[in-house]
Amino acid sequence: MSELVRVAVDAMGGDNAPGEILRGAVDALKANADLDLTLVGKEEVIRAELAKYEGVPEDRCHVLNATEVIEMAEPPVAAITKKRDSSIVKGMKLVHDGTCDAFFTAGSSGATLVGGQIIVGRIKGIERPPFAPVMPTQKGPCLLLDCGANVDPKPSMLVQFAQMGSIYMERIIGVKNPRVALYNIGAEEDKGNALAKETYPLLKALPDINFIGNIESRDIPFGAADVVVCDAFTGNAILKMYEGTAKMLLGEVKGAIMRTTVSKIGGLLIKNSLKSTMQKFNIKTYGGAPLLGLTGLVVKAHGNAKAIEVQHALEQCIQWKHEDINGAFKARMHLVDRTKTKQDAQ
């Protein structure tokens, strides 16, 4: 059996916690013999929920009591500083201490970002960690970074995003020589704002990525690039618009099929084909968004994450460990782990 991959799970984070979180955790444990989970949260609640399931591998499923929960609307810095017995803080400390390899949460994005940098810590040389969700396209998965962590990045930060994103797509998704694009309002090299104009020549000069130039919003769904680099304000807008459009179109298709008797019959005839196509564009099948560039893996899922998304995110943690993604970051980007101190954990 492969080496166990130890993941701390925030059992209390998200709109559907603890039910969907623990259901996904149990499914992941049953499907992956090399996965070891520490469920962090209110112990009595977690154990009551686990009692609903049969066949939970108890030797690979542990519970760590945490009496506090960081709510979505709380100021991130204050929450991380004051709620030291929260599931997010205690889970991240397990990663910082080396007890766990990764941390998963569907809780507060702000607290996840702040805790990731303060508690887990950045790899030495990484300026800022980006959130990097995988989005479905016509030609396969596409990595978008940043989508929520750095709204005003420097050009040098976007360069690091491109390097880490390229490695992620190669090692985790299996895309050979992934195409890296810079988000812009036009394809021309001199288009865009100051950030885009300064970043373009830096990406173009990088010898270790397959930079293909600028990309516009309309080209992303068609799979024109495997990695799209942008600031977090833009990336978050792209991601939310992407999700909203997909949800709207799905609703319209379902409505059209159910409108008349004839359309219902036609719907039955194309049901299997339509289901397969829709599944291809289901963003939940890709799990959560990793926070790249930390000394340990932190994965953030949607606040409304269901069990299947939790399971896929935890399986992503397994692949991350086996592929030694952080080692690949440091090797290609010539980085070295910083020495952790007690101050890092505070």
Image: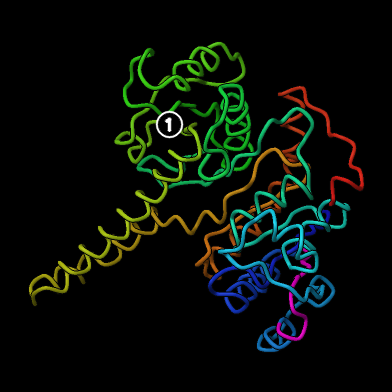
Please indicate, yes or no, whether residue 1 appears anywhere in the rendered image.
Answer: no
Q: Circle 1 sits on which residue? A: 225
Q: Quadrant of residue 50?
A: bottom right
Residue 139 at x, y percent in the picture: 38, 39
- Quadrant in which the N terminus appears: bottom right
Q: Main secondary structure of the magenta part?
A: strand
Report which quarter residue 202 is drawn in: top right
Q: Secondary structure at mark 1?
A: loop
> Residue 151: horizontal and vertical position, in percent?
52, 38
Residue 194: give x, y in percent of width and height: 45, 19
Note whether 129 is above or below 208 in the view shown.
below
Is the residue 143 above or below the residue 1 in the image?
Answer: above
Percent x, y for residue 74? 61, 63
48 or 61: nearer the eye?
A: 48
**Residue stretch in magenta:** 36-45
Give the left or right position of residue 88, taking residue 216 as reference.
right
Residue 44 shown in magenta: yes
The residue drawn where x is 61% and y is 72% is: 21
